[in-house]
Amino acid sequence: MTVWTALLIFVGLTSMQWSNKLPNEIHRIDFRRFAYDSIVREHAELWDAWKVIEAKAQPVSAATGVFLAGVFAYATQLPKTASTFERLLLLIVAALLVIAIVQSLRAIWVVDAASPHLGHEGSNEVDDILKSTQAHERLSDRFENLLNNTTNRWASSCESIRKDLNRKSNFLVCALKLLAWAAGGVFFLLLETVFLR
């Protein structure tokens, strides 16, 4: 049984005894639980977005690599009489593709993300709450503080992930833009090859 399952069972069992005695505290705990559930859902959505960006960056880097191989093959077949414009455009396209590969690889680069809450930490906190001997602090107050602290840790983790996710997204967008510019350059090379040779 996980710590969170134990917490939910504890809350379920104790909320029945609080229903007549402590209505304001139950509402406070419900609000804390709502905040906790919301931030956990946000965390899951951020990880889903993280996976999508990495999944998109992988084929972009592969396609860019194939595209770059084609440019090198074209360059090896370039005649000595090729114009300076054609040579310069070929160099620019190759440079754009290399930078696009680097950017897409940066988007899939492994980054250490902050962990919101480990199971053993939660277990230790619950043990501390249950064995606390401070008479002035009720169990409901301690549980509310636990929910609040846990929510804050998840929120901090979400903020960290959001920053890294934005960086990864910017790398991918940059790679796609560079790939589009390189495709435009290849189009001009194709026009020159077809009409001017």
Image (cartoon, helix red, strand yellow):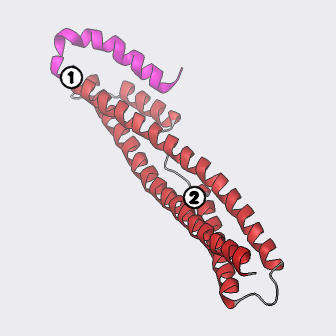
Q: Position of residue 25 (x, y in %)?
A: 20, 23
Judge left or right: residue 15 versus residue 81. left
Q: Is residue 137 above or below residue 23?
A: below
Q: Quadrant of the image for the C terminus?
A: bottom right
Judge left or right: residue 196 versus residue 110. right
Q: Earlier in the sequence, mark 2 or mark 1?
A: 1
Viewer-side residue, 157 vs 145: 157
Q: Which residue is mark 1?
A: 27
Q: Quadrant of residue 195?
A: bottom right
Q: Position of residue 119 (x, y in %)?
A: 51, 33
Q: Which residue is mark 2?
A: 107
Query: Over which residues does the magenta segment extend?
Result: 1-27
Residue 13 lies in the magenta-colored region:
yes
SS state under label 2 = helix
Marks 2 and 1, how far apart at CA: 43 Å
Judge left or right: residue 133 versus residue 109. left
SS state under label 1 = helix
Residue 9 lies in the magenta-colored region:
yes
Assign the magenta stretch its main secondary structure.
helix
Q: Is residue 32 above or below residue 55?
A: above
